[in-house]
Image: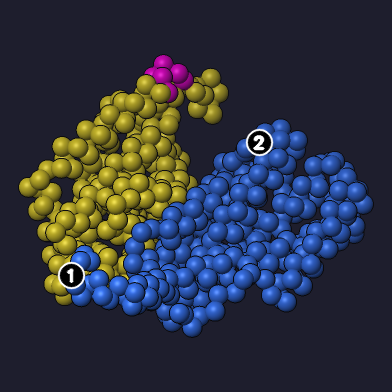
Amino acid sequence: MLSDALLVARKDLLIEMRSKVLTTQLLPFGMIVLILFGFGLSPDRTVPTGVANESRPLLAQVAPGLFWLAVFFSALLAFSRAFAIEASDGNLDALRLTGLDPAGIFLGKAAAIALELFVLEIVLGAGSFLLYAPELNDPILLAVTVVSTTLAVALAGTLYAALASGMRVRDTLVPLLALPALSPVLLGASVATEAALFGPSSDGWMWAGLLGAFALLYTGAGILAFGRVLEES
Amino acid sequence: MTTTEIPASTSSKLTRRLGFAALVSIVVFLAMALVISPPDVSQRDAVRLFYLHVPTATIAFYFAPAIIAVGSVMYLWKKSTFWDLAAGTAAELAVIFSAFTLVTGMLWGKPTWGLYWTWEPRLTATAVSFVLFVGYLAVRKLDLDPVIRSQRAAVLGLIAAANTLLVRYSVQIWKGIHQGTTISPMNMQISGLMWGTALIGFVSFTLVFAWLMIHRFRVAWLEHQLAEVGLDLAISERRAERDVAGAASTDVRLTGEGA
């Protein structure tokens, strides 16, 4: 299963390295979303921090949520792309004919998406620090949150994109299926990131754990269900 | 031309009795909820919305998703059309009852909290699961091979049902951290008459749900039958036409004048 996963992940990443669709479209898309949030929320507004007579720019305060929203929106494109590359010339049938373990295909596709999302998050994370200028209280919690969120998003997204694959309405269906299902992840990621940026860390660790549990749940669901989903899709 | 007999209506002795029982209990319920039961001490007349709200929320959040989950598992396990259609029917009702829950919840929120919407955990979770089930229905409507579509719907139905719990759980912890518990219907002062009203409301809405479930299921079953036998039926009809027309025009075709 794992060697199959590696093969599929390698294939998908190779396609991305050669086509550079995500690099040239996903990254700029994510960046413009970050900038548009600034337009929408106004950079000059401040909010009280909770400590008396202290305030913080609104954008810095809500930076965790904005960052993750930008990542989620961009991730939707990555989900669709992961199955769009299989859509032409009956590629999905060819993939099934290879005899690879469906669970391996699932994990491989999710791993490729996760790696693409990591690159995206590094760029958007740097962008968020630049544009929104939040504090950084606990880098380790931040790293753990980013990793567990990315895994959760990639695994769940792969499953939903597969469910919507092979249809003309795919591009509109993936957001409808994935976003409500991922809403607990956005919630957890935003709260945990807020704790990592502004403290206290204790709340954040609980959420990071919950994100990990979500990722595990979707790993199990995907491994069990992917064979069924791929059948004659 | 077909051996399947298409019934003229989806009602039966059972559903007629069920429908009658639902109607009677609704009338009794409305009388109790709107006239007989006293207004609440703190919520005044707004409490009457709760008699509608609690049963529909229970159906939307527990009954319908349970049927979706069981139906999905049974479909994946036994490939039974019965369970596939049962899950689909329950999902449609889950959407309707969630929408009703949201509307009554918001209408109740305005006089009680002064706002139509608060980020109350249950309200928020209901909104998200409403969209989840709409997504599930979208997959069921896809233009795919019926078996593949049912297969995918079953996988999605199972994940969506589990995901509603996740959404609910996470929203609850989220609010638990950021603010104290808001007014809960559970800590209301509730009199015997109010309990009775709530109970009858629960019974009536469960009856309505069962009645809708059976009727909608039968419609879905007929649709399925039509899709199954429809093509065969059309082919045999065309063949019959050809045979009739053929008998009349044999001479024409033999002389080569027909196309």
* The quarter of the displayed image where residue B117 is located: top right
Q: Position of residue B243 (x, y in %)?
A: 34, 77
Locate the N terminus of chain B and report the quarter of the image it occupies: bottom left
Left or right of B147, for residue B14 = right
Is residue B27 at all visible to an observer of this figure? yes
Residue type, label 1: Gly
User: What's the magenta region?
Assistant: A41-46
Locate residue B250: give its quadrant. Answer: bottom left
Q: How many marks?
A: 2
Q: Would you say A201 lies left or right of B211 here?
A: left
Residue B63's place in the image compared with A53, above or below, is: below
Circle nearer the viewer, 1 or 2: 1
Q: Which chain is indicated by disc 1? A: B
Residue closer to the observer: B252 or A32 = B252
Q: Give the residue type at disc 2.
A: Tyr
Q: Colour of chain B?
A: blue
Give the letter of the chain under mark 2.
B
The local crowd at label 2, few if under 14, some if 14 to 19, many if 20 or more residues have their Cα within 10 Å, is some
The residue under the point 46% across, 67% down is: B158
Q: Is residue A142 above or below residue B132?
A: above
Q: Earlier in the sequence, mark 1 or mark 2?
A: 2
For the C terminus of chain B, give its image quadrant: bottom left
Instruction: Find disc 2 in the rendering and name its residue.
Output: B116
x and y, in percent, of residue A48 in the image:
52, 24
Q: Which residue carries the number 1 mark?
A: B256
Q: Residue at x 83, y 63 (%)?
A: B24
Rendering coords of residue B12 (x, y %): 69, 75
Disc 1 is placed on an element classified as: loop
| Kind of element beneath mark 2 | loop
- B78, B123: nearer the viewer: B78
